[in-house]
Amino acid sequence: MRPWFEPSPHLRNTIQIRDIFPDFASQRKDTMKTDLQKARILLFLFWLLCGSSGKIWIGSRARRGESWGGCPSIPNGVNFRKKIVQCPAADLAWKAQSTEDGPNLARLQKRRRGRMYTSKELMEMEHKYGAHNYHPLEVVISKAEGIWVEDPEGRRYMDMLSAYSAVNQGHRHPKIIKALKDQADLVTLTSRAFYNDRWPLFAKKLAEFVGKDMVLPMNTGAEAVETAIKTMRKWGYLVKGVEQDKAEIIVFEENFHGRTTTIISFSVDPDARDHYGPYTPGFVIVPYDDLEAVKRAVNKNTVGILVEPIQGEAGIRVPSDGFLKGLERICRENNVLLAVDEVQTGFCRTGKTFAFQHEGVDPDIIIMGKALGGGVFPVSAVAANENVLGVFKPGTHGSTFGGNPLACAVAMAAIDVLVEEKLADRAAELGKYFMEGLRAIQAKTDKIKEVRGKGLLIGLVLNESAGKARIYTTALKDKGLLCKETHSWIIRFAPPLVITKEEIDRALKMIEEVFVG
Ligand SMILES: Cc1ncc(COP(=O)(O)O)c(C=O)c1O
């Protein structure tokens, strides 16, 4: 048995009690109280003997920032700047600070954050040291709250992109950040080699939330899509009885499901696909919103259909009413699984919890990501009933970080915020209002061809004569509104769902100034 006072091994930067009181090393938990008394007496004597150049506190639950028992002295030569000694079993903690605490903290702060750089310096640094796989708008964000972000110079901008729908709950939602901090004080990562006390709760919550038997946790959206692909294939071989290595999945032109090698194998976007071959086989690409093409593509080897209910990256392409219902029918008639990629459209973005609900569809597999992480970090998952997700057995699929306690705590808070703040209703109502405002602007200019979308996932399609969308996203940025072009001629507006009507009015004013003058 480990001695009760043994600090956790990771607290390398700490003073250990046994360094000060070696005889404690032979003691056990049952003598803890006496030892504690001894420690206090010894420490008091220790303080009396020493010069007065610092402070020591014996703290109870120092990890929560509480302390008691002041002692204004530490001996020279003992490095009490090493911060906390923790004896978890005994719930005893030591906190030592030198009298130079203020400057120390200031130095620590400086060491952690480095000096303040200007936006220009930061952009140059990124350009020099970061791979150029993005072409960001020229703005550096160093702070954010709700729908507002700020650059290092203190300029504020309205965020109308929400990290591609990953910040539906608004930047740094207090409830989500509290869950993050609380959980960070307990346990953050265990891997699934062991059970942890958050994943079961999150699994139950998410499964009940989406109305499926079970869920499988991953991290990024692409990983969840990969999981859905593996699920469909395994189900095809084990349940449907498709001949080995013959499984086919139907996907759609202009799809965007992520960046892995398998996923880009069925992309039709040359930027995403070119020079990454050899490509993964087993995908049949058909035109989006074309049920007849889907029917023609189905055969005995078809195991699944993978579809975005609205094609976000393709420029907020909303399919005709009945498209998803038609896909569901084809799936039922041919014993094929319907997998709906709700990574971008899910979690209230389109005015319903999931976009497939607009058509009352019941997909076999729901793929989720982005806003499930509450704008903090990637949390993704696949949900399905047991007859589908039950194909996985131990060792057949996994992820070191999937289902980690920190992610689970954050994701549970992220779901609570969506429900408590009725963000689906809000997106439906404000999305309508925003689109009406945009259509009123469209009526005043020939630069805008179409306003389309659902809820607060809105695309502004420009006429070719208007020039590239980048001109307008840059002009809007200069006015204080951040949004992003998708392809060269479409601008996407997808603000955090906590946006207010007044803020939409402000956005519309800026958009009108840019497009109408
Ligand atoms: C519909 C859809 N699926 C999957 C992904 C991939 O998600 P991630 O970037 O988290 O891998 C995206 C990302 O934009 C997406 O829009």
Image (spheres, grey):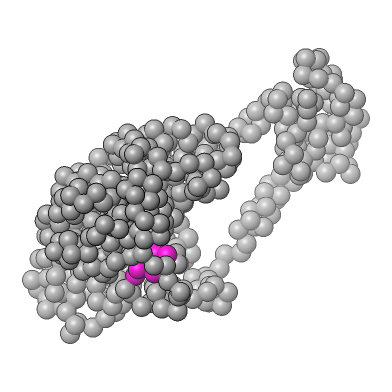
Residue 260, image x, y percentages: 44, 64
State whether the magenta stretch is mostly helix, strand or loop: helix
Q: Is residue 295 left or right of residue 75?
A: left
Q: Quadrant of the N terminus?
A: top right
User: Is residue 508 something one can see in this rendering?
Assistant: no
Residue at image point 80% right, 41% down: 80
Task: Pinpoint residue 397: horizontal percent, then vertical percent.
Answer: 49, 48
Can residue 423 be seen from the camera position used here? yes
**Number of numbered tags placed on the structure image:** 0
Residue 265 among those drawn in magenta: yes
Question: Would you say 30 lies left or right of 401 here?
Answer: right
- Between 36 and 208, the one lying in front of the other is 208
* Residue at screen point 41% across, 53% down: 230
**Who is closer to the viewer here, 495 or 372?**
372
**Image quadrant assignment for residue 11:** top right
Residue found at x 63% / y 53%: 109
Residue 272 vertical placement versus 18 (above, below): below
Q: Is residue 315 left or right of residue 10?
A: left
Query: In which quadrant is the C terminus drawn?
Result: bottom left
Residue nearer the viewer, 491 or 328: 328
Q: Is residue 67 left or right of residue 96?
A: left
Q: Is residue 74 above or below residue 228?
A: above
**From which residue to which does the magenta span run?**
262-267
Residue 184 belongs to the span the image colors magenta: no
State whether residue 132 is above or below residue 86.
below
Q: State the residue at coordinates (11%, 56%).
A: 321
- x, y percent for residue 59: 70, 28
